[in-house]
Amino acid sequence: MYRMYQIFIEILSPIFIMIIAGYGIQKKFKLDLSPLTKVQLYLMIPALIFYKIATSQLEGDTVLLIVGFTVAVFFILMFVSTLLSKLLGLDKKKEKAFVNAVTLRNQGNFGIPLMTLLYGATAGGYGLSVHMIVLLTTNVLLNTFGLYNASSGSYTKKDAMLKVLKMPMIYVVILGFMFKGFALTIPGPLEASISIWANGVVPLALFTLGAQLANTDIKLSDKSLPIAVGMRLIISPVIAWLLTLVLGITGTTAEVLIIGASAPSAVNSVLFAMEFDGDAKYASETVLLTTLLSAVTVTLTILLVKG
């Protein structure tokens, strides 16, 4: 019981406070959210991705295993959720929002505090190091396949691909691996600026989510919402658990991979829907529901995995 209380107070409460702040300010001042979205997509998120790649310390077979595992979970969920969206008869925009709600998970502002609480002070922070590789991989998937999926709901496949190529995410990934591969050092003042931008992603993204929720008439009446929520919070960690058995992954690495797979839907799914004229209302609903219910489901996942 103490562990459940601790997780809620130390991890979920700060998240909800920032969302509520965005909600309240938007209700009061009616801000234009488009500039906030662009600042995140074109500056702060690219800075985060570049910084995480360029400064990563883990190498070797374990990194490749973690990356491969994360990619496998992503595409299994994408395949299943796409099939379900067809069976449910969702329109194109809602289908893309449904798929992103299931496949894109919040490994940053939710996952980092969670893993820090669970593993940051044990075994040299090994569990947290594993999670950073998961975070990097999910960020790359989110800002390539997730972004493409979101934009293809309102554009043709060709135009959607052009939208992806115009975004900076792909190029900062390449640049980050160049810096790491050639052991290049980021100049001091530039590194300080990039670090500040990267650290700003979490509060601004949650503030924007709260503001978006203030603009949305949420009725939670769509029949596919419970399915999207169940896929994200329950089916995803089950798939991750099965994969650890198949691949023979054990110990702390397996724990981190399973618990990470139980995270709620990524805030970026709302940003993408806003930026590319998608179903932002549906995206906001899934993020809100999965975040609220994760207080129960993630706690249970931790108890089952570590028990």
Image (cartoon, helix red, strand yellow):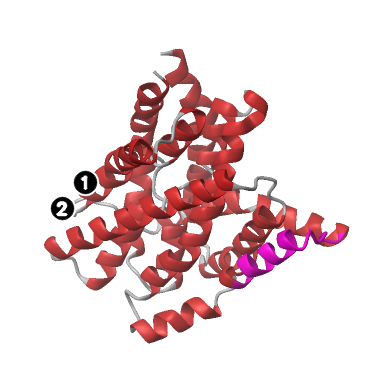
Tell me the element at label 2.
loop
Q: In this view, does 91 lie to the left or right of 244?
A: left
Q: In which quarter of the image is residue 297?
A: top left
Q: Name the residue under label 2.
A: 223
Above/below status of 45 relative to 118: below
Asked whether 33 falls inside the magenta stretch, the response is: no
Q: Nearer the viewer, residue 131 or 298?
A: 131
Asked whether 174 falls inside the magenta stretch, the response is: yes
**x then y, percent, for residue 266:** 44, 52
Q: Residues within 10 Å of mark 2 (few under 14, many from 20)?
A: few
Q: Which of 287 and 184 is in front in this view?
A: 184
Q: Name the residue under label 1.
A: 226
Q: In this view, does 221 lie to the left or right of 254?
A: left
Above/below status of 1 relative to 280: above
Q: Residue at x 46, y 47 (%)?
A: 106
Q: Which segment is the magenta one?
A: 171-187
| Residue type at tag 1 | Pro
**x then y, percent, for residue 223:** 15, 53
Q: Do the residues labelled 1 and 2 touch (CB within 8 Å)?
A: yes
The disc at residue 88 is: none
**x then y, percent, for residue 113:** 56, 35
Q: Residue at x 46, y 18 (%)?
A: 3
**x then y, percent, for residue 2:** 46, 13
